[in-house]
Amino acid sequence: MVHERRIEGSDQPMELRVSGAVLHGNLIMFDKKTNTRWLQETGKAIDGEKKGLRLAQLDAKKWT
């Protein structure tokens, strides 16, 4: 999965890092600036400042 690191309305990309946690087999990414955790599979924020938002999915073929 490849996701856009910019939230709508923001021109600055988030610095997503691996949190070390997994939920239902999905890697959880973490953005320290917003204290938000994101599911890799869906791009959905599961807690933190951006909870409920979803990252746009990008075409992985462009990034391989």
Image (spheres, rainbow, N blue to C red):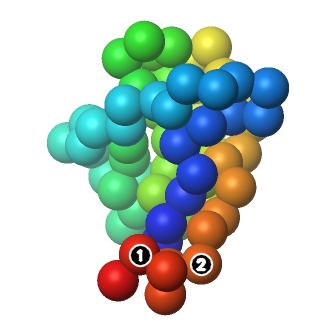
Element assignment for label 2: loop
Q: Position of residue 21 (x, y in %)?
A: 27, 44
Q: Which amino acid does label 2 sit on?
A: Asp
Nearest the viewer among 9 and 23 is 9
Q: Which residue lies furthest to the right in this view?
A: 9
Number of other residues with Cα within 10 Å of mark 2, as a class: few under 14, some 14 to 19, many 20 or more:
few
Looking at the image, which residue is at 41% across and 62% down?
26
Q: In this view, does 1 lie above or below 35?
A: below
Asked whether, in this view, residue 28 is left or right of residue 58, the answer is: left
Q: Position of residue 24 (x, y in %)?
A: 44, 62
Q: In this view, does 37 lie above or below 23?
A: above
Q: Mark 1 points at which residue?
A: 63
Asked whether, in this view, residue 7 is left or right of residue 15, the answer is: right
Looking at the image, which residue is at 62% across and 14% down?
49
Give the quarter of the figure containing the C terminus. bottom left
- Label annotation for residue 46: none
Determine if residue 22 is in view.
yes
Q: Is residue 4 above or below residue 30?
A: below
Nearest the viewer among 26 and 29 is 29
Q: Where is residue 18 in the image (x, y as percent from the top left)?
A: 25, 43
Instruction: Measure the alpha-carbon separation of dots 1 and 2.
Output: 8 Å
Nearest the viewer among 31 and 11 is 11
Q: Which amino acid does label 1 sit on?
A: Trp
**Mark 2 and mark 1 in contact (Cβ < 8 Å)?**
yes
Asked whether, in this view, residue 27 is left or right of residue 4, the answer is: left
Element assignment for label 1: helix
Looking at the image, which residue is at 41% across and 53% down?
23
Looking at the image, which residue is at 70% across and 55% down?
56
- Label annotation for residue 59: 2
